[in-house]
Amino acid sequence: MPPSPRFTQSALVGWTRDLGPDRLASDSLEEALAPTLARLRLPRGILAQMTGINYRHLYPADSPTHFGGLVAAQRLLAEFPRLVDKIEFHLSTSVGRDFLEPSVASTVAAALGLGPRVKNLDLGSACLGFVDAMDLAARLIEAQSLEYALITAGENSRPLLENTLPFLLEPDLTVREFFRYFASLTLGSGGAAMLIGPMAQHPTAPRIKAVASLSDTGSNDLCQGDFTRMTTDSARLLTAGVQLAEATFQLGRHSHGWTADYFDAIICHQVSRANTDKLCQTLALPPGRLFETYPDYGNMGPVAVPFSFSLAWEKKLLRPGQKVVLMGIGSGLACSMLELEIPPA
């Protein structure tokens, strides 16, 4: 297998996050599902016990699905006004979208006032989209085909949640059907934006160093959904996803010298406690180095990785000189792991 690419010219110039304002507890969801839980003889507290998720956030019902990404991008560009005219590429990685056309990227770009020379594209890779967009931007910068790229993502899980609850209350729903739609209850809402640019112009910014990616498209049917319903074979998805992650990490070991204790901090797309724990166990990653966000925010889709990175930075959990990995597994299946290095102070 050929080695994965390394980068020498790309940096993470800036980042911001946004969070849906409405906080919804797992206990509240179970109150709404009480008739079904009683009929199927499922214990109260099962949602938090099985997933480790206590809360998720939602945007108002009238919010466009990309709203969080737009708000994050507005905040980010306000921090870097002198770089706005240098942006040449804008990638929207939102899974949710209100229309099949136009692209979400074009809608966000119009609201941001990005100029006509900016190429606006949607990049869809399920929950992995944001990491893949960072990878693509870095490759273009390395090829000297790009100076600055803006990446955005916004997710609002309210429509899917509100469409799923009535179905879960149907009197003939079986236990098997309940658990096939169970993952819809774990989704959270938020937004994120990042600006990728040349390392030479931003010597103190985190450096994008390397990436490793693999896919398992034979497992594309294990999680499928839209705003109406999302079905998941959770057991098979967990097994296939972790196996793919293990192979991807081995590719990183071969190409970049990664080892179990190579990274000082681990920022990953988090689905639940079981998935996160199994990933750390299989890759022999020190669990204390992984920044957990799923208990309070749920599964935020492609927003999860940049949101968690931004939150970890705000909490001063990331420090100069550290090596950080951004990793995720997306439906399809696809897995990417991106190495960052924070320059010494």
Image (spheres, rainbow, N blue to C red):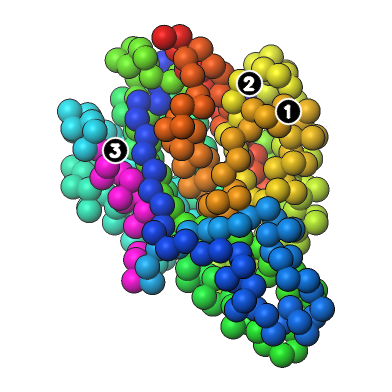
Residue 67: image quadrant is bottom left
| Residue ID for mark 2 | 263
Separation (CA) of disc 1 from disc 3: 32 Å
Placement of the N terminus among the 4 image quadrants: top right
**Mark 2 crowdedness (10 Å alpha carbons): few <14, some 14-19, many ≥20:** some
Q: Which residues are magenta?
A: 62-77
Label 3: state its secondary structure. helix
Q: Residue at x 46, y 32 (%)?
A: 315
Q: Amino acid at mark 3?
A: Leu
Separation (CA) of disc 3 from disc 2: 27 Å
Image position of 176 with respect to 210: above or below: below
Q: Do the CB atoms of the residues marked 1 and 2 lie less than 8 Å apart?
A: yes
Numbered circle sitting on residue 285: 1
Task: Please tell me whether residue 75 belongs to the stretch shown in magenta.
Answer: yes
| Residue ID for mark 3 | 76
Label 2: state its secondary structure. loop
